Amino acid sequence: MTSPNAVPDRMLTRIGGLLRKAESTDNEHEAEAFLAAAQRLATRSSIDLAVARAHIAGRERRPTPVQRIIPIGEPGKRGLRTYVQLFVAIASANDVRCDVARTSTQVFAYGFDSDIDTCEALYTSLLVQMVRASDRYIKSGAYRSATVEKVVVEKRWGRQVRRRVQAPLAGVTARLNFQMAFAARIGQRLAAVKAEVEAEALPEGSTATGTALALRDKEIQLADFYSRTSQARGTWRGPQASAGHSAAARRAGDRAGMAARIGTSPELPAARGQLASPDTPGGSA
């Protein structure tokens, strides 16, 4: 079925093309001829020439990838790596590439404006949910009955021997493990949503459709922009719970990640950064 706006759009494009030719030629007679032809079409269709100009200009302004700096937190603040993990998980499901500052205080996001906007809105909402959920877990005292696996080094017969032991779980370690599992679960949920949406938009065997070609073109543009712009050295390896691994805290964080509300709110503020920054990216994610 033809859209009711299809004919007006085609007419606007035709008129806009004639106006562009009239404005770009150095030949006065050609310019008058193109302008007259545009006016005749516009009169028949009751379309204002200014509207036609705006239409053609809008079609020619193709979106391009950008780099944006996402503030994560102040230097020295605990948990910044898990905050970064959460943003990177969200970005991965929204066609945004990331470099992470060595201090984990900010993320360099590469993508199209609308995709980065989505990431920021989701991150703002989910970060609040992650912090609140981990606070509730710690205040409940549930972690006190859990243990953490640590590697200890002992001397035996003049040799150093490493062995794994179970130790009481500290609150800081419990929080880190909880948030790591929360962020990981959010990443899995968003990836599943993305796969479902793409499967609906791209049925099996439809690799040559306009949607498939548009997505492929977007991917190529982003990859090219990232390779030209990124200054990252190495690969970001994610948060490391150096104090140990707690299965109980991970399970609690995973459950909270499953229960988290995923959605974007237009009223959420989006913090924007500049291309230049004194903090060098430490690794790509």
Image: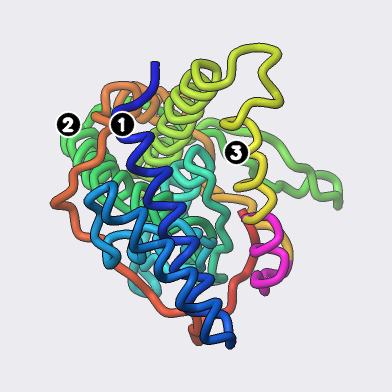
In this view of the protein, which residue sits in the foreground, 12 or 225? 12
Q: Closer to the observer: label 1 or label 3?
A: 3
Task: Name the spot of residue 251 as percent of width and height, x first.
Answer: 40, 23
Per the image, the residue denoted by label 1 is: 143
In the image shown, does 29 or 54 lie closer to the viewer?
29
Q: Residue furthest left?
A: 267
Marks 3/2: CA–CA distance: 46 Å
Helix or strand or loop: what does disc 3 sit on?
Answer: helix
Where are the magenta residues, as a range? 222-233
Q: Residues within 10 Å of mark 1 (few under 14, many from 20)?
A: many
Residue under the point 33% across and 42% down = 8
Q: Are marks 2 and 1 in contact (CB under 8 Å)?
A: yes
Mark 3 neighbour class, 10 Å CA radius: few under 14, some 14 to 19, many 20 or more: few
Instruction: Give yes or no for contact between labels 3 and 2 (Cβ–Cβ under 8 Å).
Output: no
**Can residue 231 be found in the magenta stretch?**
yes
Q: Earlier in the sequence, mark 1 or mark 3?
A: 1
Compared with residue 6, is residue 84 higher up or lower down, i.e. above or below?
below
Q: Quadrant of the N terminus?
A: top left
Residue drawn at x 64%, y 51% is 237
Q: Residue flagged by tag 2: what amino acid is it? A: Ser
Residue type at tag 1: Tyr
Name the residue at 47% across, 42% down: 94
- Disc 2 designates what residue? 140
- 3 or 2: tag closer to the N-terminus: 2
Image coordinates for residue 39, horizontal then vertical, percent? 34, 63
Label 3 belongs to which residue? 215
For this view, does 233 lie left or right of residue 102? right
Is residue 71 or residue 158 the one in the foreground?
71
* Amino acid under disc 3: Leu
